[in-house]
Image (spheres, rainbow, N blue to C red):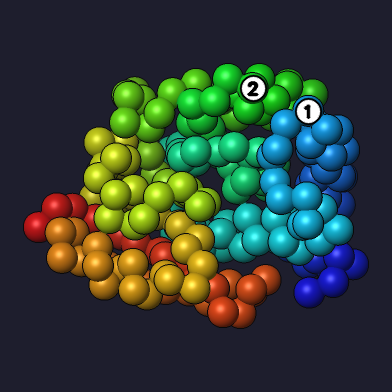
C-alpha cells in the first residue's frame, strides 16, 4: 500500500475531515520525533500506511462492540489510540506510563480538540476504570497471555480485544488458550500480509 493509497483508504471510509485531523497529528508526530523516539525513524516515509491505516483497520473489527470506552494500553506515540480517537465518536483512554509520552499525548488531544480522549499516566495494572472497557487495543506491548492478565480487570465478558500481533499472532493465541478461554480469531493485516490481528471476545481465565 502506497502513501497515496493509504490516504485514499482513510478518506473513503472516514471522510475528509478525519483525514485532515490525521494530517495535523502527522505534523505533531514528526515534530515531537526530534525530541523523543516515538516510532522507528525508518517508518516515517510510510507513516500513513505503516501506522495510520495499520491503526485504522482495527475500527471495522469492533463495529459490533457495545457502547463505552476504547482502552488503548501502552499508547506510546498514540498508535492506535489517537487514531481511534480521531476516527470514532467514542471515549478513548490512552494508558501510558512514560512521562514524556504522556505529555505528548495530552498535547495532541488538546491541539486536535479530541474532547473524548483521556490520557492516563499509569501502567495498566494500576489503572482502575470507572466502567469496564468496551474495546481494548495494544500494539507491540506484551505477549498475548501476559497482556490479557495485566488488563483483564479493566474488561468484562462483552469486551472486544483488537491486538495487532505480527507474524506470531496464531502461535500467541494457541499459547494463551492454555490459561484463557473465549472466542479468538486472527484477522490478516491489510498493511502487512504476513501479520495478524488477534480479535477476541468473551475472554476469561480457565
Residue found at x 70% / y 38%? 37
Estimate the x, y position of residue 120 in percent, counting from the top left.
50, 23
Residue found at x 32% / y 24%? 126
What's the mark number on residue 35? Answer: 1
Residue found at x 18% / y 59%? 180
Residue found at x 56% / y 59%? 58
Mark 1, Cα crowd under 10 Å, few <14 / some 14-19 / many 20+, is few
Residue 157 seen in render:
yes
Estimate the x, y position of residue 129 in percent, counting from the top left.
35, 26
Q: In the shown orientation, is residue 124 left or right of residue 30?
A: left
What's the mark number on residue 100? Answer: 2
Q: Nearer the viewer, residue 51 or 61?
A: 51
For the residues labelled 2 and 1, the Cα–Cα distance comes to: 9 Å
Q: In the shown orientation, is residue 48 left or right of residue 71?
A: right
Estimate the x, y position of residue 137 in percent, counting from the top left.
47, 49
Image: 80 above or below 185: above
Image: 133 above or below 40: above
CB contact under 8 Å: marks 2 and 1: yes
Estimate the x, y position of residue 96 in percent, counting from the top left.
51, 30
Residue 120 seen in render:
no
What's the mark number on residue 9? Answer: none
Amino acid at each position: 500500500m502506497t502513501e497515496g493509497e493509504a490516504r485514499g483508504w482513510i478518506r473513503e471510509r472516514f471522510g475528509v475531515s478525519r483525514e485532515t485531523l490525521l494530517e495535523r497529528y502527522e505534523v505533531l508526530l514528526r515534530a515531537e520525533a526530534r525530541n523523543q523516539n516515538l516510532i522507528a525513524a525508518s517508518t516515517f516515509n510510510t507513516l500513513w500506511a505503516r501506522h495510520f491505516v495499520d491503526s485504522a483497520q482495527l475500527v471495522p473489527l469492533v463495529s459490533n462492540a457495545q457502547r463505552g470506552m476504547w482502552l488503548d494500553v501502552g499508547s506510546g506515540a498514540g498508535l492506535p489510540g489517537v487514531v481511534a480517537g480521531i476516527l470514532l465518536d467514542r471515549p478513548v483512554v490512552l494508558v501510558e506510563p512514560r512521562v514524556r509520552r504522556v505529555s505528548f499525548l495530552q498535547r495532541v488531544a488538546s491541539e486536535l480538540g479530541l474532547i473524548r480522549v483521556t490520557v492516563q499516566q499509569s501502567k495498566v495494572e494500576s489503572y482502575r476504570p470507572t466502567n469496564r472497557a468496551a474495546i481494548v487495543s495494544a500494539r507491540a506491548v506484551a505477549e498475548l497471555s501476559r497482556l490479557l492478565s495485566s488488563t483483564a480487570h479493566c474488561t468484562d465478558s462483552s469486551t472486544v480485544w483488537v491486538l495487532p500481533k505480527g507474524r506470531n499472532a496464531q502461535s500467541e493465541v494457541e499459547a494463551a488458550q492454555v490459561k484463557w478461554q473465549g472466542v479468538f480469531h486472527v484477522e490478516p493485516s491489510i498493511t502487512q500480509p504476513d501479520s495478524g490481528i488477534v480479535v477476541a471476545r468473551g475472554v476469561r481465565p480457565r
